[in-house]
Amino acid sequence: MSARPTSPGPVFETEVLIIGGGTTGTGVMRDLALRGIHCLLIDQRDLNAGASGGNHGLLHSGGRYAAGDADTAAECRREGDILKAVAPECIDACGGLFVAVEGDDPEFAARFPEHCRSAGIECSAITPAEARELEPCLSEKVYAAYKVPDATIDPFRITLENVNHARQLTQSIFLAHTELERFIVEEGTIRSAICRDTRSGDTLTIRARQVVNAAGAWAMQVARLAGCSGVQLLYSKGTLIISNARIGRRVINRLRPPGDGDILVPGGTVSLLGTTSQTVENLDDIHPSVAEVDRLVAEGCALVPQIAHTRFIRAFSGVRPLLMARGAETDGRKASRGFSLFDHESEGLANFATVAGGKLTTFRLMAEKTGDLVARRLGNSEPCKTATTPLPSGDAIRWTEPGFAARYWAARREPGDLILCECEMVPTSAIDAIVENAPGAELQMSLNAIAVRSRVGKGTCQGAFCSLRVTSHLYDRQVYDSPLGLRNTRDFVAQRFKGVAPVAWGEHLPQLELAEALHCALLGLDQLTDDGLQSPTTGGRVP
Amino acid sequence: MIKEPRRHQAELLVIGSGLAGMAASLFALARGVSVAQVGNSGVIAFTTGYLDLLGHDERGFVDDPWQALIRLREDEPRHPLANVTENDIRAAFTSFTQSLTEMGLGYTAPGAHNVLALTPAGTLKPTLSLPLTMQPAIAAMAAGLDTLIVDFTGLNGFSAREVVANLSQRWPGLRAARIGFPDMDSGAEVYAEVLARALEVPATRQLLAERIGPLLGSAQALGLPAILGVHRPDHVHRELQSLLGVPVFEIPTMPPAVPGVRLRELFETRLPQCGVALEPQHRVKRLELHTQGVTAHLEDAYGEVTIEAAAAVLATGRFTSGGLRADPNAIRETLVNLAVSQPEGRAHWYRPDYFDPRGHAINRSGVMVDEQWRPLDATGKPAHPRLFAAGSLLAHQDWIRQRCGAGVAIATAYKAVDAATQAARSG
Ligand SMILES: Cc1cc2nc3c(=O)[nH]c(=O)nc-3n(C[C@H](O)[C@H](O)[C@H](O)COP(=O)(O)OP(=O)(O)OC[C@H]3O[C@@H](n4cnc5c(N)ncnc54)[C@H](O)[C@@H]3O)c2cc1C
Ligand SMILES: Cc1cc2nc3c(=O)[nH]c(=O)nc-3n(C[C@H](O)[C@H](O)[C@H](O)COP(=O)(O)OP(=O)(O)OC[C@H]3O[C@@H](n4cnc5c(N)ncnc54)[C@H](O)[C@@H]3O)c2cc1C
């Protein structure tokens, strides 16, 4: 057989190609769309597949950086205020506390208010007793406490809203599971991007006037594909754990130089305890480990003793892309949290930009700076509008908020609207809205993709049961019509497992045992081959 | 309410009411041993109703489990099934399925080969013995009959289309249809157990047959989710077949499902009728071991209960049922604090890949027994001469991956009761 000729596959045309569907890439997409520019956003996996789906969701007041990095701290404060105004439905302005417990450096604690003042962060001292009244879960060993305007943000909702708005404004497009493989560069200009659809294996070509690299931790790799070596990143893996119920009202930060297990962040109905920090070389196969979980629990107990007995339902990890300045240190926590925008002009490229580093909290600012550069290059003189234009919501993009589905379902009282996910009360109507119209909705949409756009799989059962009910519903709707649907389910539960296994003990372990019984003993998902079929060695016999 | 202490006495105490506990009581009754039994229903409520002996080994699906058992004795000598002879396993399975059939829940006799039974996802599962209400699927599939699979509006988690989509390559004559269940067709959620109870009424069966009949077309067989009655499934099944004129078979639904409810209700009504002092829905709080036997302490709504017995079979199951408990770094047995064979530390409980075909080490953890099925304590000696263990609680087996759940439960209950009876009667 002769080798298949390499065809360019389908060709997409756009003004701006954005690589990376995290908060930064989607932020750039919306920023540009608000200036009337058409964008095409790709992600090798899906929206929020990188750090944007693997963080605390803490909208920093800046307090955490006040001592070490006053600029980042002030940036966080300003951006936090803007986001609270333009995207209130994505934010829980719960407030935050910084508390020092016995053993923490008293001098560090004493200087905190002063650092906050210089960064312009509101900060008020309260007594340990007052702190414990506000947050009864706090340790009796608290000796200093300050209130700051920390908040939390739903990173999934904000991403979906960014993409949805860009779609409304300029019919910009998001393509999931589309991996950039190489660029075709001619005369200092990227002419096209050759991508692979990782689901089908097919090649596609994207032609754009400008290309933005917002690939997060992968930004260095993407820049290298364009022949640019100026982007130098350090990879710092961080692991977090999620409790099955919310622990505190507010964000609780430990008042000491950043270390393991020193932030407890509420996330709607749950809390997230983070984080560890470990330099890694490789971006593949990033998963939480038992050792990291144990470390978080051990450290977290000092702040909030009940953590020792808390049921955790899942652990997850993300990689912080930290910019390596010249002679930078190799400690992930001390490297800069600021971001950089590379125009690559000194490297001989006129239509390529990389935005790297930064934080979820500052994604809008990162997008603004990138948008300014790209718009100018395109000869577009519209100013940035993201600081004042509210983010619109929509039917297909409101399902990531904890508790929303339950309220919606109860208020609607539509008897035929069956609940598919009992832990999070996700009804069939939510799934229908998502498969019809969520950003990235497509034929044979995967269960993973639906989960990113909803609360499916995020409750106590971690998808063991609801994945199967959602699958059945998708077969009913003929979203699936072949064994591939079941293979999606298999991949989804295999993915959830990586987060459940490290926290499986006590009351949570039976959940995993039951899940495995269901998935393997009962349904034989472990026996599905990659075409979704089973390969039994026996024929059907009549007993 | 006046709470007063009560005492029961029996030759044998069975702790646990899962498959192993229920089988143990049946085997003891068959030997004329007096039995007291405690325990809530455990994971029975989750079963498909299929009774697996050994459905899977490292070569894949097992066709001949008896042959596979010979290999198992070689490869995994500590596996509980490797320590029961083929004759005993056959005797245990045959006796168990016969008892079920006699009590009104018909089962196929264990044969020479596994059969491939249907799952709610339209995949196939190797098993040894299955409820008669599910059996016709095997022949219909083997013959490739044109077959209609019907599901119901509002029955969450069971999709005929899913069954067909996953099975049609192997069974091309399959077709799916959805109907409303008679008198429960508003579109609102319906529950398998409720449908099953409704079908015990002849008029409902008649209405159902009237709805399905016109859809049959050329179909030579009919598949339904498992809803054909709770107490007399064989009768409901026969009646529906004769109303429709084609073979009808059930497909298990997502747990907790009707086949599990049938088993549980059957045991809970029939065992007491056979003289078992059954304390369902309770747990033994404390078990005292003394030279004359055992004393179990529990508490129900009317106060404390003590059970004295000459010997006990511990069949408390694994983590889901509470027989084992996982502390953050060690696994323990919850009632007697027996030694537990286990991996070193939590980092070794699970492999990185969920579906790793070698399975997870934690599933092979459990209680170790001597050749008389007496569980060992930390010193490696039997914890007590009159304490025996059976079922999924035992170490060195992975029922989930080996598809040997019922096999381990039934075969080891048989052996444990054997040994316990001798001990109890040794005076
Ligand atoms: C553990 C942890 C906790 C954190 N906590 C907070 C916090 O509480 N508050 C806060 O403000 N910030 C926090 N951060 C930082 C914040 O999460 C990140 O700065 C932010 O999410 C980065 O977003 P991004 O869009 O730049 O990158 P990412 O979200 O990583 O997105 C990059 C995307 O690019 C895609 N991609 C990569 N290569 C290719 C390719 N070749 N082709 C196509 N697509 C590609 C990836 O799939 C990925 O989805 C945390 C980070 C970590 C790791
Ligand atoms: C989803 C699922 C599907 C399955 N499908 C199949 C199948 O298709 N085929 C098959 O062969 N097997 C199947 N099984 C497996 C089978 O049900 C189990 O292997 C079998 O029930 C194990 O039986 P057991 O009696 O040892 O334990 P369990 O059924 O777990 O029973 C243990 C009992 O001990 C009781 N107990 C615990 N502690 C105490 C105490 N202190 N005092 C009193 N009682 C106590 C519990 O309440 C429970 O009643 C399935 C299991 C599950 C979960």
Image: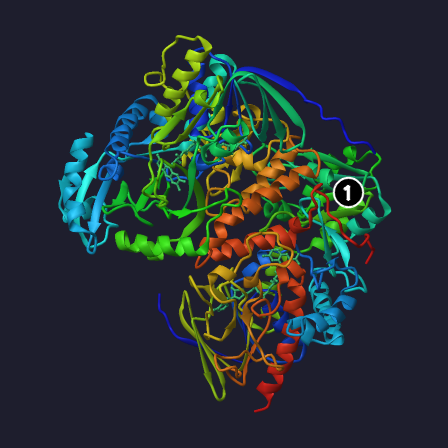
Q: Quadrant location of the C terminus of chain A?
A: bottom right
Is B22 in front, or is A37? A37
* Rendering quarter of residue A386: top left
Indicate the position of residue A203 as horizontal and vertical percent values.
66, 27
Q: What residue type is labelled 1?
A: Leu
Q: Which residue lies furthest to the right in this view?
A: B143
Q: Where is residue B373 in the image (x, y as percent from the top left)?
A: 60, 79
- Tell which subunit mark 1 falls on: B
Q: Position of residue A362 (x, y in %)?
A: 34, 28
Residue at (62% x, 63% y) in the render: B398
Local SS, label 1: strand
Q: Residue at x 76, y 61 (%)?
A: B108
Residue that lies at the very extreme toward the bottom in this rendered image: B427
A330 on left or right of B131: left
Q: Which residue is drawn at 54% across and 69% down?
A: B366
Colour pattern of the rendering: rainbow
B90 sits left or right of A448 in the view:
right
Ligand 2, by image quadrant, is: bottom right
* Snapshot quadrant of residue B419: bottom right
Task: Please name the residue that numbered disc 1 is placed on.
Answer: B222
A245 to A172, vertically: above or below:
below
Of A66 and A478, nearer the camera is A66
